[in-house]
Amino acid sequence: MGYVVSTANMKGGVGKTTLTVNIATCLAKNHGKRVLVLDLDTQISATLSLMSPMDFAKLRKKRQTFRYLLDQIINPDSKPKYVIQDIIQPNVCNLPGLDLLPGDIDLYDEFLVSEMLHEQAVALGENHFETIWNRFERVLLGKILEPIRQDYDFIILDCAPGYNLLTRSALATSNFYILPAKPEPLSIVGIQLLERRIGQLKESHEQEAEIDIKILGIVFTMSNTNLLTGRYYKQVMYRVNQDFGSEKIFQTQIPVDVNVARAVDSFSPVVVNSPQSSGSKAFSQLTRELLQKL
């Protein structure tokens, strides 16, 4: 089996999706890896970074998004129309080896999930609803990915900001997680909150099954070399270094580069759209560093 890697931060706007799609693209394009991107964010930014809104709308109309697979877990059909292989979009951006499992703007109804789990708890005579819920979130994504997990070298899960059911399930399923962060105080708070949450997640599941997820590293995004802001950024990064240790921080930083934002308009990552740009070169270097860490 390949690696399952989550990209996550409790705070939004830290470049998480940009990091996900560009690392995935570099792994496929530069290193010949088989890579699947799974979009777990209802903002569907990863999906729209790899395909046009028109193509996504067609898939959604046919129900060929991740929402369908979740529905099959929550309210299964006796004869499902699709399996996961039908929903995965192969060779996105015309890149062999780069596949996408499209997200959706409406992934699941939390009330229906709670109702289903309550019924299970009653049927099993379980007194503790929390036990049933923990078990569900631990196996949810693993169960969905099980049929195709051996088909890929990397499955990269683009988590939503915050700490919802799918983010918890992603972390419980993953071998590693990457923590993107802007070099600013609020982003550091997001790092600290996620680290605390992962500790709580491991503790809440330890009686039934060990969650063995490790941090692959913190990646500083949107770094600015401007003299004044650069000095401030260095102070912030020094604090992170003191708190987490240099071994948990990627040496490669992603610079501010307009080409990174411009690439989204073309529904393709910057490493495809502007391969000679500073942002593209940084993502390529970051991917090499990631492989060295592994």
Image (cartoon, helix red, strand yellow):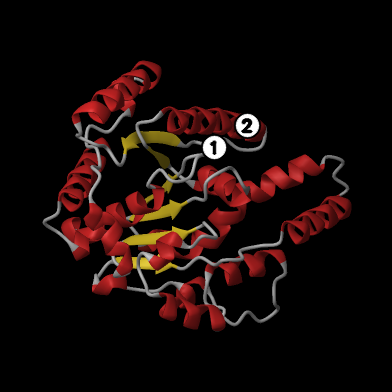
Residue 193 falls in image quadrant: top right
Distance from disc 1 to disc 2, alpha carbons, whole Å, reads 7 Å
Front-most of 111 and 211? 111
> In the displayed image of the protein, which residue is found farthest to the left?
276
Residue at 61% from the left image edge and 55% from the top image edge: 140
* Left or right of 57 in this view: 46: left
Front-most of 193 and 233? 233
Determine if residue 90 is in view: yes
Residue at 49% from the left image edge and 33% from the top image edge: 190
* Left or right of 161 in this view: 72: right
Q: Is residue 6 above or below residue 45?
A: above
Q: Position of residue 68 (x, y in %)?
A: 59, 72
Q: Which residue is mark 2?
A: 206
Mark 2, secondary structure of its residue = loop
* Location of the C terminus (image quadrant): top left
Residue at 54% from the left image edge and 54% from the top image edge: 142
Q: Amino acid at mark 1?
A: Ile
Mark 1, secondary structure of its residue = loop
Residue at 25% from the left image edge and 42% from the top image edge: 254
Q: Which residue is mark 1?
A: 211
- First-in-chain label (1 vs 2): 2
